[in-house]
């Protein structure tokens, strides 16, 4: 649920990075944070365990001028991917305007990807939201690893809803694909908001 | 659904928050949605990372509500965070989110709790109206 302040000429939007544990969600935000830090004096907040696994969420606020005449604030969140943290995952997902599903390309993780994707749909439905009703894209991360499954196979596993969505290959540790994904999802979300406003 | 805030909403919300600050002596007050977005804020924000404050208090309060259901309570209407110099009080704003108040330890918690609860009640119809209009 985006917040549009006509009074302050400001739009605030929430984008959630979702996916199985260790797929690289936090790494995406860390890379974005590193790259924009000089321009944008905002900090990233992480609630994590000692081993760097996300316990509750990561939070990174960004500001852009993507909508003419408005200040656009994008709030990026990651969920904890570990299966047992579903309660907190649901809380972080509340009110998301867009979702980036970060899948782990390794062969051994394909079942976890599918389970997490199913979990995303279920958690949205509990809030009365159909996945197809919100903008989302797929990021196939860890393409640098030798045992990465072919993208076609991951498409077959994950991009099988009624409407196909854009998917991107990424190596988040090197920043490859990270900004392509961010740019694409922000554009999709903004396009949807503009469409909603016209209605 | 998007939440659309008009100039008239902004003025109404800000005047309620200003009233709260004057009455309670809080340093700052803000109205935050369940999704962690700031709907309105007033007071002294110098040196405060506003967006992080909002995201963290919304997250913290969401866990508190989950905690309530674990012990069979319908909801907790307020949470108090106590520090050496600064205290934070978070009050439930029904069907929307929370009212966050930051204050120095000089202010009594009883005062904050009382005024925060009244303020929540004053905010609720304004927000209900705003949400209804946004649909
Ligand atoms: N080789 C490789 N490793 C990666 C890549 N992206 C992330 N990693 C590593 O994978 C591990 C997990 O990354 P995180 O970003 O913490 O994963 P997460 O999805 O946030 O995990 P949870 O918080 O448990 O849900 C870290 O050691 C990262 O350095 C990648 O593209 N290639
Ligand atoms: Mg993480």
Image: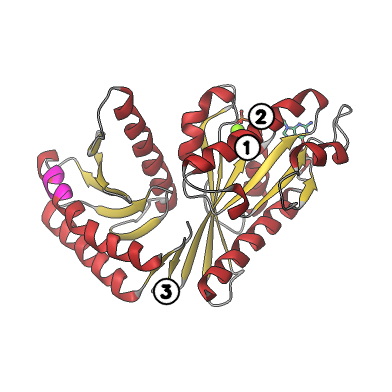
**Which numbered disc flags the more N-terminal residue, 2 or 3?**
3
Q: Report how far apart the C-alphas of labels 1 and 3 lie in the structure.
A: 33 Å
Give the structural element (helix, strand or loop) at label 2. helix
**Quarter of the figure with the C terminus of chain B:** bottom left
Q: Is mark 1 within 8 Å of ligand 2?
A: yes
Is residue B113 part of the magenta span, yes or no? Answer: yes
Is residue A193 part of the magenta span, yes or no? Answer: no
Q: Report how far apart the C-alphas of labels 1 and 2 lie in the structure.
A: 19 Å
Q: Nearer the viewer, mark 1 or mark 3?
A: 3
Q: Quadrant of residue B119?
A: bottom left
Give me the residue at 22% from left, 58% from top.
B123
Residue identifier under label 1: A26
Residue B58 pos. (x, y %): 38, 43
Give the structural element (helix, strand or loop) at label 1. helix
Question: Magenta residues?
Answer: B112-117
Residue A158 pos. (x, y %): 74, 39
Q: Nearer the viewer, mark 1 or mark 2?
A: 2
Q: Which mark is residue A6?
A: 3
Looking at the image, what colour scheme do you see?
secondary structure
Q: Which mark is residue A115?
A: 2
Residue B60 pos. (x, y %): 37, 36
Q: Quadrant of residue A142?
A: top right
């Amino acid at each position: 649920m985006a917040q549009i302040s006509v009074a302050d000429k400001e739009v605030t939007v929430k984008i959630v990075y979702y996916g199985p544990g260790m797929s690289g969600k936090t790494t995406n935000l860390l890379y974005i944070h590193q790259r924009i830090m000089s321009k944008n004096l905002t900090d990233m907040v992480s609630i994590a365990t000692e081993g760097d696994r996300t316990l509750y969420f990561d939070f990174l606020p960004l500001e852009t001028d993507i909508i003419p005449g408005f200040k656009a604030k994008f709030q990026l969140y990651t969920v904890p991917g570990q299966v047992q943290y579903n309660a907190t995952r649901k809380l972080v997902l509340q009110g998301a305007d867009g979702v980036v599903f970060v899948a782990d390309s390794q062969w051994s993780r394909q079942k976890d990807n599918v389970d997490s994707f199913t979990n995303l749909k279920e958690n949205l439905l509990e809030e009365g939201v159909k996945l197809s009703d919100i903008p989302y894209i797929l990021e196939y991360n860890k393409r640098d690893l030798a045992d990465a499954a072919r993208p076609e196979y991951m498409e077959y596993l994950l991009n099988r809803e009624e409407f196909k969505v854009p998917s991107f290959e990424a190596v988040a540790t090197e920043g490859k694909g990270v900004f392509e994904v961010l740019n694409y999802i922000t554009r999709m979300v903004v396009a949807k908001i503009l469409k909603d406003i016209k209605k | 659904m998007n939440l659309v805030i008009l100039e008239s909403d902004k003025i109404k919300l800000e005047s309620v928050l200003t009233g709260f600050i004057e009455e309670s002596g809080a340093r700052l007050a803000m109205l935050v949605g369940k999704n962690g977005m700031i709907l309105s804020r007033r007071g002294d924000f110098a040196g405060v990372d506003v967006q992080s404050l909002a995201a963290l208090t919304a997250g913290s309060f969401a866990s508190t509500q989950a905690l309530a259901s674990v012990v069979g309570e319908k909801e907790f209407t307020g949470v108090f965070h106590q520090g050496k110099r600064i205290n934070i009080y978070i009050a439930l704003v029904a069907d929307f989110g929370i009212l966050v108040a930051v204050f120095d330890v000089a202010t009594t918690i009883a005062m904050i709790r009382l005024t925060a609860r009244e303020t929540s009640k004053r905010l609720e119809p304004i927000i209900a109206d705003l949400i209804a209009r946004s649909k």
